[in-house]
Amino acid sequence: MKPNNCPETTVENTRPQADQPDDDSTLKIVSKQFLCGIPVRSIRWHGLFERELTWDEQAALLDVTVDHPLVRRYPLSAEYQAAFLKHIIAVLSSMNVEQHDRMYENYCAMLSPGTELPLDDPSIGLSYKHYELPHGQGVISLKESGAFVTDGTTGLCSWQAAKALCEHISNNRDDFHGRNILELGSGVGLSGIYLAKCYEPSIIVMSDCHSSVLTALKENVRLNFPNAAPVECDNPLVSLLLDSGNTLMGVMDLDWQYISASNLSQLIEPDVIVAADIVYDHTLFPALLSTLNYIFCLSNNRCKFVLACTERNQDTLNEFLQLLIGAKFRINEEPVSPSRHFHWDSSACNIRIFTITRAFS
């Protein structure tokens, strides 16, 4: 999740240059990074600590981070907030700056037992992150896990490929606006909810197959669309269907091994399929390929598949791409957009994005 070319944070000794952000802009930049849980060592401070901060300035920093109204209602993990405050206290102490009382009050509160919200399953250890959207389009709040594997799945947090996919979507609006969209492997819902909030798809179906992931996904959809009206659905695999007025949104238990029994066609004929970080286990490839064949047949091969991958193992990714080629799919690799709106670390891992189509039958 670290932004591009972001060094370890150090205390700067010079004043901001003329082309650096003003104080209000700096606070907004820091706030955006804090809200989505950028690792503290990777936050870009934009000269915030290049001079001593007054109590009022410290208070303003707290107001847009640990005391932000969203954080008060839907807290980030106590561990993360404590690390954030510890870093600020250390920097101010090194400058012999007296820290605001609220700084220590918040820090001590984060170290107290029971600080985490009592969410549905405390053993899972979920907390919130908040993603400010580009162009003033609002905020996505997601219940996520900070652990790599939680409750036996990796699907309970937003991975870097999902953020890169959102960045790609933001730069290719016409490919998604007003479409029928199916997301495979939705996880906690960052990409799907972003599409639903900002691109007015006619229908978007977010899918996964792990019970804990589906529970979190449904709650995140409800959280971000509190006024959407429930819609009845006869398909037992569709556990949530909401109408926001502009978009029909569904959450579906979609097991790729049983795609033909899903009755997906009764719910959606996709124009676009999207997915992020689903190509990591070659044992899943036959079922995934069968799913793609099935969905493309629904649209008479008129849909397209936008896939974002973190290339952890080049051979594994190449194996999947060769399977697609063997099944008569066409693959076009897209340029990966810089990390502008969704903070992700393009320097730490190789993100690749593909548009996959098939000749009309």
Image (spheres, rainbow, N blue to C red):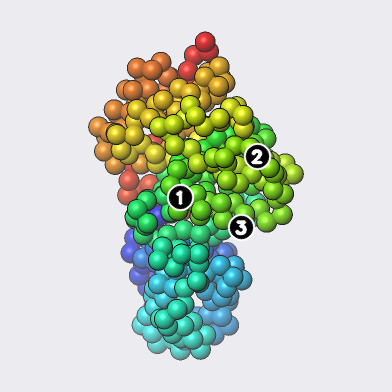
Quarter occupied by residue 161: top left
Taking the image as shown, residue 67 lies to the left or right of residue 42, namely right
Name which residue lies at 46% across and 89% down: 98
Mark 2, residue position: 233
Name the residue at the top extreme: 361
Name which residue lies at 68% across and 42% down: 232
Amino acid marked by disc 2: Cys
Distance between the alpha carbons at the discs numbered 3 and 2:
20 Å
Amino acid marked by disc 3: Leu
Label placed on residue 223: 3
Q: Is residue 238 shown above or below 291? A: below
Amino acid marked by disc 1: Ser
Distance between the alpha carbons at the discs numbered 2 and 1:
19 Å
Mark 1, residue position: 211
Q: Where is residue 41 in the image (x, y as percent from the top left)?
A: 36, 65
Q: Where is residue 196 in the image (x, y as percent from the top left)?
A: 62, 44
Distance between the alpha carbons at the discs numbered 3 and 1:
18 Å
Name which residue lies at 53% across and 66% down: 31
Q: Is residue 23 shown above or below 158? A: below
